[in-house]
Amino acid sequence: MIINYQQIGRIKMKQDGFDGLNKTGQRLYFIRQFCEDDSSFAYKPKGSEETHYGRIIQMNLNTQEKSICFQAGPELGTGAAEKYLVFRNFAPSDSNFYATHIGYKSIFSFGLGKYMEKEQKKIDWIEPDKLKATLESLQRLKNDFFLEEPALHPKYDFICNEQQTDYPGAEEADKSDSKTFDKAIEKYFKNQIYGLSEERRAFALCIDGKFVHEIEELAPFYIDVLFYHILDKQFTDSKNKGFCHLCGKEALLSKTVALNQKFYGATNPYFFDSVSAPNNKNAFAMCKECYMEVAVGSKHAAKYFGSRFLGLDLITLPEPSLAHVNEAELIQSSNMQIIPRLLRFGRKSVMKDNWELIQRMRKHLNKFSFFFWNKPSATSQIFIINQMIKGISFNSLVQKSENLDELAEQACLERVLSENYNLSFEGLRFMLLPSKDSHPNLKISEYQKINREILALLSSYLYSQKIPYKNLIKMYVDIHARKRNNLGERSDYELNLSAFIMSLYIKHYIAFNLISGIKTEEEKNMTTTLEKAELKEYFANNAAMYENNYPAQGLFILGTYISDIEREQKGYGSSDGKTPINKTAITKLNLRGIPLPKVMSVMATIDDLRGIWVKYQDPVLDAYYRECMTHLPQSSLSPEEIVFHILAGRSYQSYLAIMHKKNQEINKQNQEVQND
């Protein structure tokens, strides 16, 4: 992952012309990688779906009029945090030297001059001959506008008249200790200043209307301070010398890391923050040059390659060793963000609308990585790693997407379900693992386990690792039963078709050798022959599950019988022939699993219902069905497999009925067009 970030950073710096910038420009470029994320300032007002952004509240020092006024500054939309150098503290003990910050304390107790004096011998100044004059200028500014007791703060008399309410006057300040004074200032900002920006605000100290990094005399020194605090300060220990784990060169190593993303595993840290001689074997040590590349790469990836997938935060990373065709292509956000979309609902439209892009990516991107993460809190800089799926074949993913499209098209799923319906990994996930439809009362803590299961399923799918057939069936049957129990007043239309759709996913898994444990059955002598064309075609198209597997075929036919009964029950219902029956034949079955000894009882129940509801019965099919079921006691079918094959037959029969109705509607429409 770190190597991926380094490669992305190197390409990005090259593309941005980093080497052609002057020293101040290079430092400014680097420190912008550590500005606050734009997402921190985005919000949706209550009752609205429209995204709004907070604003910068400027504390403007007017040197001509000797006045201080707070005013609403620019909106913090995309790119604004980097433009205006908005920071947050990297540690609670950070000095108040930031001129633009997410909190008001940094600008209110602006200590840039004090910090420069304290660290001036350690900082590598670009214009050292002008340092003295700059320090004197900052001291004059401080003397003119600020008081130091009980804590550094602007002078009361300088605050513009309309903003003086609730601000502690000189006498109040003299009588206050620092804690009391801080509470008074907090109240002042809450009552007087926060209203200048509705939500998600930042604060900036401006001088005569200009941000500090825009003032020609101050900007180079402010940038030097930021560069030292963010980067150079990490490399001040001359004893911490060793070999960089990225480039292999011997150099000064960073003892602590101020990266925006501090990576931790679920339980153990990866030691990015504690590189030292005793810990060097376990820590990830970086020299300054590699550190800069990693910082640039991590910021670019988090900003442009991030997305939400399967309910988790995801960063999609190109594999670094494969940037040999067109390096610039690898850092385009459209490329990386399209990859998870190939696994989502609506994937077919993505394939169709972006086919040229996908083909270009096939030429220059052989592999990629998925990095799933979360933050313990909204303000945390620590990234908890949920899963890192590395070395995924992009070509294999596209091939799987193409196969899913073919299966959906062959089955006419768009006609049966909706115009936008398609098969996808995300769709499979909701068939196999818990969701709100199957587990409506899940606790937040339970989602952690589910997320691990989701990522394990995704990992096996992307790595083309085999999953046991019985496990797949067991997962499906469990979720299907739970969804049916929690259906409530919702329509069961899609749920009734789900076993047919699951069979398509199994067919997909078989095509890519992703499934194991499907037994090849030996052909047995059958005295009757299956004649029904639809069933013969289905069993042939799903030969891995049904060829010579007569018990499975018999259960499938049993499922079609149940569908026939339910169609009559829903159509006629009660004795008055008008009210449909709610508890149809399927409710007679234990859908969590039916043991082999119980199947005969189920058959008897369905036989009774067929005698009541079904007007016509195919004697040849019925003879074939009963002969198939005679082989059931010798089979090794699990209770879940028995349920699945029954559901699959029921689902397929429902599918055929829907298709027949749809075709009739299409023929009628065509006939009307011809008549017109």
Image (cartoon, rainbow, N blue to C red):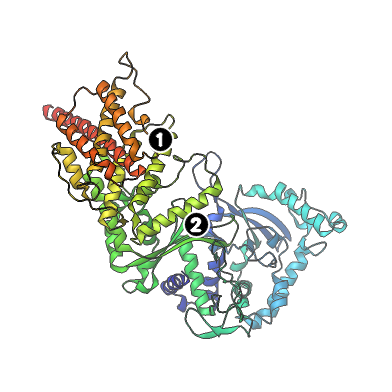
Which quarter shows the C terminus?
top left
Classify residue 142 as left or right of residue 483.
right
Local packing at callout 1 (Cα closer than 10 Å; few below 14, some 14-19, many 20+) is some
Classify residue 64 as left or right of residue 281.
right
Q: Could you tell me which residue is drawn at 71 percent across and 58 percent down?
A: 68
Q: Nearer the viewer, residue 485 or 144?
A: 485
- At numbered mark 1, what does the secondary structure look like: helix, strand or loop? helix
Q: Nearer the viewer, residue 616 or 436?
A: 616
Local packing at callout 2 (Cα closer than 10 Å; few below 14, some 14-19, many 20+) is some
Classify residue 610 as left or right of residue 232.
left
| Residue 357, visible in the rendered structure | no
Q: Which mark is residue 115?
A: none
- Kindly give the residue lying farthest to the top in the view shown: 576
Q: Nearer the viewer, residue 384 or 237?
A: 384
**Rendered image quadrant of residue 83:** bottom right
- Circle 2 residue: 78
**Rendered image quadrant of residue 65:** bottom right
Q: x%, y% of residue 631?
A: 24, 42
Residue 45 versus residue 134 in the image, above or below? above
Q: x%, y% of residue 210?
A: 61, 63
Q: How many marks do you count on the picture?
A: 2
Question: Gap in Å between the C-alphas at discs 1 and 2?
Answer: 45 Å
- Kindly give the residue lying farthest to the left in the view shown: 675
| Residue 237, visible in the rendered structure | yes
Q: Nearer the viewer, mark 1 or mark 2?
A: 1
- At numbered mark 2, what does the secondary structure look like: helix, strand or loop? loop
Residue 471 versus residue 573 in the image, above or below? below
User: Type of residue at label 2?
Assistant: Thr
User: Type of residue at label 1?
Assistant: Arg
- Circle 1 residue: 484
**Rendered image quadrant of residue 483:** top left
Q: x%, y% of residue 446?
A: 53, 48
